Image (cartoon, rainbow, N blue to C red):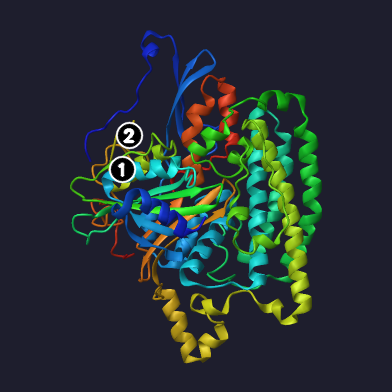
């Protein structure tokens, strides 16, 4: 290692004590995650901000070059850990694109249910945290009950709550139980009431609106130039949604709207996320109806939970492993990671909680990727933060940060 | 807007300079000489029929076997209006990995190029602030290059006898 280097450039006036240098440090209750900002403030007005990131960099791209494909799924969990099923599904869809596997309809609908539930979980956190940063703590405590119910659904399906490692290439590891469907139906009755409570408490609240309108704005042109995607871009007025532009996983069969804002300020981002939650509830309802219609028409579809051509990624049933030779060999091969992929180069993206999560995978035909790059929306739009808070107040800088929904795991990977 | 149309427009302007046209999994991919990367991206941005005004991704790949062009910088561009995506690759030798910066054209390229410099050592000429972004500033090697192992061999506090890798 070479000598320590210092890259902090202080502004001209700070040496004459005209402005204050404030370290909004990596450990701070208002920055939800570990990232640092060195702010140059004049009174309460922010003149300049220099962000520093990398406190939670875990070398995922390097690790991914040494792991078989299904072992990379836990890495993708930890990117945007508030909505990890979306990252998992996106990764599995990338491998399916590489190998040319087509998933059955029931798998697609179940995947959509899980992805929309995790999108709701992510937006619930983000919106309630905007409330917390403006002082409205009530919503946060009420809304986490809903999040617990979503976690219970994930637990029924895959066993874990937050970093789910859900699904396999071609589908799911096991069929959804009756209990999971019961819980999803129960959630569909609770969610509208919870979201309505949220609306009543914050949407037309005088203090919340005064705090948030006009704070941290960004125009659509600048947002597009900065590579914004997701709710932050939609709040600026551009209706780009990967689910509509390049539909994956049968999203083209669903009927939903894309909420769009005008100014790109904190209030717009809050409203866009809230609108998306309502749309997600509608999508989940439609998906459940489609699953039930499919099962009624073809009763043996009830047992379909993965694509038959992806069976070399699925462990065979245990009773076969203990009695049949081929199943034993298959099981061993899969656990040891001796499943080779096709050589090729593929880029696939899904609409994550924060925008377009992309996976650029180069495979040389071996058991691990040659190169895997995650296109992380948080990393790309956080660059715009200094421009968004320039000439605003310090308190606006804090709520801009929470409204951007910067998740440190996705920032650093 | 089909891949053939984009290919035709680019060949009209740049001719034989753009090589290695492929369409893996439906995405038009081509290779541009390293010195022309900004010219091609500017043309893709300005041309009214092409309008590739969104930089989706910028990253690098290291191919130690391609002597003379070991580092490849890959740009993914997106035309939001007509919903078209393309992938542009450039190759530079590892001894002099100089690439013109795209941060004047796309502000999104600023941190993406810093990340690429941090991990691969690609020197983006003209970048306003080319310093490491995710790794510690004192690091003096480029970790994503293939010659560096995944774990730091200079660490003495891990006992691999019991839990071998």
Please provide percent x and percent y for residue A396: 59, 24
Specify whether A221 is left or right of A18. Answer: right
Residue closest to the eye, A357 or A24? A357
> Under tag 2, what secondary structure?
loop
Residue drawn 73% across and 24% down?
A207
Determine the residue positioned at 56% across, 61% down.
Answer: A89
Q: Nearer the N terminus, badge 2 or badge 1?
A: 1
Q: Is the residue under label 1 in contact with that under label 2 (CB below 8 Å)?
A: yes
Q: Looking at the image, which residue is at 71% across and 77% down?
A: A302
**Quarter holding residue A67:** bottom left
Label 1 element class: helix
Whole-number angstrom distance, CA of label 2 to CA of label 1: 11 Å
Q: Mark 1 points at which residue?
A: B117
Side of B41 where A123 appears, left or right = right
What chain does mark 1 sit on? B
Q: Name the residue under label 2.
A: B127
Which residue is more in the foreground, A319 or A222?
A222
**Labels 2, 1: front one:** 2
Please provide percent x and percent y for residue A33.
Answer: 51, 39
Q: Where's residue A46, x and y in %?
A: 51, 19
- In the image, residue B62 sits, relative to residue A45, either above or below, namely below
Quadrant placement of the N terminus of chain A? top left
């Amino acid at each position: 290692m070479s000598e320590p280097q210092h890259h902090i450039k202080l502004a001209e006036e700070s040496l004459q004590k005209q402005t204050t240098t404030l370290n909004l440090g990596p450990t701070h209750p208002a920055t939800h995650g570990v990232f640092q900002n060195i702010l140059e403030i004049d009174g309460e007005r922010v003149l300049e901000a220099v962000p520093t990131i990398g406190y939670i960099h875990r070398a995922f791209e390097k690790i991914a070059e040494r792991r078989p494909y299904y072992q990379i799924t836990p890495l993708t969990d930890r990117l945007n850990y508030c909505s990890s099923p979306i990252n998992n599904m996106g990764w599995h869809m990338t491998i399916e694109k590489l190998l040319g596997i087509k998933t059955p309809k029931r798998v697609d609908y179940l995947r959509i249910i899980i992805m929309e539930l995790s999108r709701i979980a992510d937006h619930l956190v983000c919106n309630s945290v905007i409330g917390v940063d403006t002082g409205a703590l009530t919503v946060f405590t009420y809304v986490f009950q809903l999040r617990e119910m979503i976690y219970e659904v994930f637990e029924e399906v895959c066993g874990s709550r937050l970093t789910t490692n859900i699904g396999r290439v071609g589908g799911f590891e096991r069929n959804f139980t009756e209990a999971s469907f019961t819980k999803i139906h129960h959630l569909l009755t609770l969610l509208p009431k919870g979201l309505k409570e949220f609306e009543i408490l914050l949407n037309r609240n005088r203090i919340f609106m005064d705090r948030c309108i006009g704070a941290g704005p960004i125009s659509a042109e600048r947002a597009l130039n900065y590579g914004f995607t997701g709710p932050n871009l939609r709040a600026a007025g551009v209706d780009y949604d990967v689910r509509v532009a390049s539909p994956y996983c049968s999203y083209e069969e669903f009927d939903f709207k894309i909420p769009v804002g005008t100014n790109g300020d904190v209030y717009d981002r809050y409203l866009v996320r809230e609108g998306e939650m309502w749309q997600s509830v509608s999508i989940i309802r439609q998906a459940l109806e489609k699953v039930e219609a499919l099962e009624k028409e073809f009763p043996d579809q009830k047992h379909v939970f993965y694509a038959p051509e992806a069976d070399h990624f699925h462990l065979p049933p245990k009773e076969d492993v203990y009695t049949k030779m081929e199943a034993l060999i298959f099981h061993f091969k899969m656990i040891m990671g001796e499943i080779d992929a096709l050589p090729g180069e593929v880029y696939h993206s899904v609409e994550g909680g924060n925008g377009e999560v992309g996976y650029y995978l180069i495979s040389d035909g071996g058991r691990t990727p040659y190169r895997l790059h995650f296109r992380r929306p948080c990393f790309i739009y956080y660059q715009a933060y200094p421009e968004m808070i320039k000439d605003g107040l310090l308190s606006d800088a804090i709520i801009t940060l929470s409204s951007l929904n910067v998740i440190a795991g996705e920032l650093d990977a | 807007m089909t891949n053939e149309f984009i290919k035709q427009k680019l060949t009209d302007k740049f001719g034989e300079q753009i090589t290695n046209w492929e369409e893996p999994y439906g995405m038009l991919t081509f290779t541009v000489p390293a010195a022309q990367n900004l010219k091609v991206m500017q043309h893709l941005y300005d041309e009214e029929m092409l309008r590739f005004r969104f930089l989706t991704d910028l990253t690098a790949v290291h191919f130690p076997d391609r002597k003379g062009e070991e580092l490849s910088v890959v740009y993914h561009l997106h035309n939001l209006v007509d919903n078209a995506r393309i992938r542009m690759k450039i190759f530079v030798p590892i001894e002099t990995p100089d690439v013109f910066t795209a941060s004047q054209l796309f502000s999104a390229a600023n941190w993406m190029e810093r990340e690429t410099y941090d991990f691969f050592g690609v020197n983006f000429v003209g970048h306003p602030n080319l310093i490491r972004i995710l790794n510690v500033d004192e690091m003096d090697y480029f970790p994503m290059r293939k010659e560096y192992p995944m774990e730091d061999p200079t660490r003495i506090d891990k006992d691999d006898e019991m839990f071998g890798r």
